[in-house]
Image (spheres, rainbow, N blue to C red):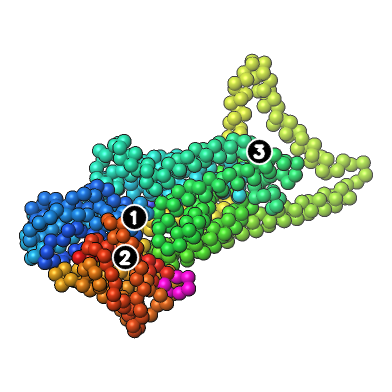
Amino acid sequence: MTQTIAPRVRTLVLLILAVAGALLAGAAPASAHAALTGSDPAQGAVVDTAPSQVSLTFSEPVAVGDDSVRVLDPKGERVDKGDPANPSGTTYSVPLVSGLPDGTYTVAYQVVSADSHPVAGAFTFSIGAPSETTVSVSAQGSDDGLVGWLYGFGRYVSYAGFVVLAGGAAFVLACWAPGARARAVQRLVVSGWLALTAATLGLLMLRGSYTTSGKIGDVFDLELLGDVLQTKTGAALVSRLLLLAAAALFIAVLFGAYARTADGGAPDHAAEGDGGSDGESDGGEPDKRDLTFGLALGGTVVAAGLAASWAMSEHASQGLQAGVAMPVDVVHLLAVAAWLGGLAALLVALHRAPVETPVGRDAVRRFSRLAFGSVVALAVTGVYQSWRQLGSWSAFTDTRYGQLLLVKIALVAVMVAVAFLSRRWTQRLADARVSVATGEAARSEETERAEEAEEEKQPAGTAPAEASSTSAVSEAVEAAKAPRASDAEKAEAGHDSVRAAQLARQRAATEAARQKRLRDADPNRFGLRRSVLAEAGVAVVLLAVTTVLTQTEPGRTEQDAKAAAASPSSSASTTGQGSGAVSLTMPFDTGGTNGKGVVSVDLDPAQAGDNALHVYVEGPDGTPVDVPEVKIALTLAAQDIGPLPVAPDHITTGHWSASTVQIPMAGDWKVEVTVRTSDIDQVTVSKNAQIG
């Protein structure tokens, strides 16, 4: 049967690798996690007079450098001057040289979003009238090309290494203590540590080039590396390396002192209340229990720290409820590692476990309980993360993030179904062992009764048949041993100890092979291996999809960007600078019920002195809606003026107004709007406008 099934197993493995490879190859480079939601001048706009600056507004804070925003004239010459201003908000402005002639100008930007991903793009606007331009801005960003591919590959390897490292160690401590002495399990956990360490070092070296030029030659630029160390992502990678040093000490103790205390005897007969380690003695070993507790506590702290190095620098650290989202993300990653990494360790143990300590039903049952707890944790944290990253049911189908999330949910469902089959094989394995033990006991009782009856039939003075039989067997055994004894005597006489050692090793190897054949011949164990192999294959694809999700723009951000782009006044641009009026439109999301919408601010005549201000609030469908409170604040950072509060009066549904808004001087003013949709849910959005 093994020869018949083996090709199917190989085919399954090849299919899994092919699907995983397709996901890895088809995964787009890191998508824009911070989306451009507006600009001044607007994309494609035609303005009457040359603006003094160009402003870009993003959906979240971004990191900018000297060349993050470039403005090029029709001939391709740069017309921007100075560094981008206002780096503390979501709107960034770069001043332009004065006296720009009419024509079409190109704005190219390359920034780094707050969750560590590069964002690049370009658009055009025209002064006076559109014209031909020689500028050809490539859509390729720094995250494309060889550096981008290497950085993305490093992310996959780092996630896989963490899962194998944390999950494999958890499997040994919580499910199968003799695994600490199994070479295959040791190699698996150490390989996870090596993969995570190498990937982290690679990401740290690639980070500078990945977020700037995208050139392979800049990977070894020490100045760029120094800049990376000053960023949040650089600090997270360095912290991860320090924690990996602690993880190395943990591994040394786990496979050293702890492995020496692990009982390699009959694991399936261990007491259920021994703390989860097969074959452990229940009493008289306080040092061992202390060591197990210390490893479990220390390992959990190190694993949580490693998980936090992702949470503090990616999606969870930005957006709504970051203080809650980061701990939730840590729990989510730990649950993934315990389930998928433990599954990998179980698969290795089933195929490569030592003959003297095979993986028994108790170890599989313990892992089943661990996996069930992990799935529950994944479900709870996954629901919260889905709400936070999507924000609406439509985002499941209308955004790439939502579509990938649906694929992930389907894969989890498949894994749970396959795990149910594995549980059935485990139960059959247990039942088979119980039936074998019962059969042996019954046969023993029948043999004893037959021997007693035979003794009663023997005439007096006659040796029992059992004695005769025993004597005959003893003589046969002695006869069989005689040549061996003779050989041993000859070997001893000839001082041939090497030959005797070789014979002993051969006999041990033969006995081990015989036991392995008996173990592998168990159809229930073979079925368990196949189901675990299939589950592990789905897990590989699931891990690939999860990694792609971490590099994909959240659905909430993508929909907000689409809404802003679809709005006719979505940018912080003037509706005809010559007309003396400014109209700003900003999407908002307070995170509560009915907390999404669009707020518009009209300022007329947008000059120093008295101005009329109108505020309009619309729901996602464009209909006017009332909210409990709307507040306005005006700030001129260049002159250190403000914030100047404005409290508009409610006029009608979705409309507030203030008739005498005093603006003391002209300049690039930040307009901040605070929208409160309930007693606890509110958000502040802002855009810049040139006034005067």
Mark sitting earlier along the chain (1/2): 1
Q: Residue furthest right?
A: 460
Q: Which residue is mark 2?
A: 634
Q: Residues within 10 Å of mark 2 (few under 14, many from 20)?
A: some
Q: Residues within 10 Å of mark 1 (few under 14, many from 20)?
A: few
Q: Quadrant of residue 570?
A: bottom left
Count of marks overlaid on the render: 3
Q: Quadrant of residue 473?
A: top right
Report the residue at 26% width, 39% height from top. 218
Q: Amino acid at mark 1?
A: Ser
Report the residue at 80% width, 36% height from top. 471
How far from the left and from the top, in percent, is residue 20?
37, 54
Q: Residue furthest bottom?
A: 652
Q: Amino acid at mark 2?
A: Leu
Q: Secondary structure at mark 2?
A: strand
Mark sitting earlier along the chain (3/2): 3
Q: In the image, is 189 to the left or to the right of 650?
A: right
Rounded to the nearest angstrom, the CA distance separating label 3 from label 2 is: 69 Å
- 679 drawn magenta: yes
Span colored in magenta: 676-681
Rounded to the nearest angstrom, the CA distance separating label 1 from label 2 is: 16 Å
Instruction: Inspect this view and state whether residue 631 appears.
Output: yes
In the displayed structure, would residue 492 be above or below residue 171?
A: above
Which mark's residue is nearer the viewer, 3 or 1? Answer: 1
Q: Which residue is mark 1?
A: 88
- 221 drawn magenta: no
Q: Which residue is mark 3?
A: 261
How far from the left and from the top, in percent, is residue 586?
30, 69
Q: Quadrant of residue 546?
A: bottom left
